[in-house]
Image (spheres, rainbow, N blue to C red):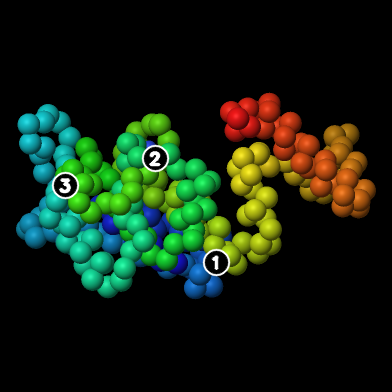
Amino acid sequence: MRFDIITVLPELLESPFAHSIVKRAKEKNLVEIHIHNLRDYSKGKNRQVDDYPFAGKGGMVLMIEPVDKAISHLKKERVYDEIIYTSPDGELFNQNIANSLSLKGNLIILCGHYKGVDHRIREHLVTREISIGNYVLTGGELAAAIMVDGIVRLIPGAIGDESSALSDSFQDNLLAPPVYTRPAIYNGWEVPPVLLSGNEKEIDQWKHQQSIERTQLLRPELLK
Ligand code: ADE
C-alpha cells in the first residue's frame, strides 16, 4: 500500500510515521508513505501556495495551481484509488472507513490548510473528503497522521499478533474488554480470577460479556 501526502507542513508529518507499528510496517515494505511539500509545486518566487479569497475576509486559501500540479505529477506515475481531502466538512472517519481504505493500493491525501483549498480542487480532483471529528484543527496534517495510523495497523502483517487488530474496540461495534498484566495482585487489587483460570471458553465468554457491558455503559449509541 502507498500513501502520498501533500502538505504545506512536511515537518509536522515526520514523527508520526517514524515509530512503532507504522515504522515497522514501512520496514517490512507493507506500506510506503511519501510526503510532498506543496511549495515544491509553486511557481512563485517566494514558493507561494496561498492567496486571498475572492470576495472574502480573513484567512488565506490554498491556490489551485500548485495543488493541481502536485496531484497531476503523482497521477502520471500511478493510478490512485482515492484522492482524499482532509476537512472538517468531510464524512467522519471511523473504523469502517479505516477497514475499507486498508484494502486500497494507492491513496493521495491532500492536507487542507488556512481557510481551505480553492473549491475547484474539491469539485474536480478530490474523490473523498474526510474529517476526524467535529472540531476545527489548524490544518489537515494531524488528521492525515491519524488516518494513516488507523489504516496501516490494519494491513495484514503490520501487527505481530494478527488477531489483535480484529479484537480492537469498534471492530464489531463493541468496545474492547479490559486488559491486565502481571502482577495478578497489586496493592490488594486483583485481576479477575477467570483470566487466570486457563479455561479458554470461559475467558472468551467473560471478554464478550465485558465488551457488551462496557459498550452499554460508555458508548450505548454503538449498540443501536
Ligand atoms: N482540518 C481541520 N480540521 C479538521 C478535521 N476535524 N478533520 C480533518 N481535517 C481537518
| Quarter occupied by residue 57 | top left
Q: Residues within 10 Å of mark 3 (few under 14, many from 20)?
A: few
Q: Are marks 2 and 1 in contact (CB under 8 Å)?
A: no
Residue type marked 3: Arg
Q: Which residue is label 3 attached to?
A: 120
Label 1 or label 3, whichever comes before in sequence order? 1
Give how far across and how far down residue 172 sits, in percent: 64, 44
Q: Which residue is label 2 attached to?
A: 91
Q: Quadrant of the C terminus?
A: top right
Cβ of mark 1 under 8 Å from ligand 1: the answer is no
Give how far across and how far down residue 72 sits, in percent: 20, 64
| Quarter occupied by residue 80 | bottom left
Residue type marked 2: Glu
Identified at 23% across, 47% down, the residue is 122
Q: Which residue is label 1 attached to?
A: 24
Q: Is residue 118 left or right of residue 24?
A: left
Q: Is residue 142 left or right of residue 102?
A: left
Give how far across and how far down residue 56 sits, in percent: 11, 31
Q: Nearer the viewer, residue 220 or 57?
A: 220
Residue type marked 1: Arg
Label 2 or label 3, whichever comes before in sequence order? 2
How far apart are the alpha carbons under marks 2 and 1?
Answer: 29 Å
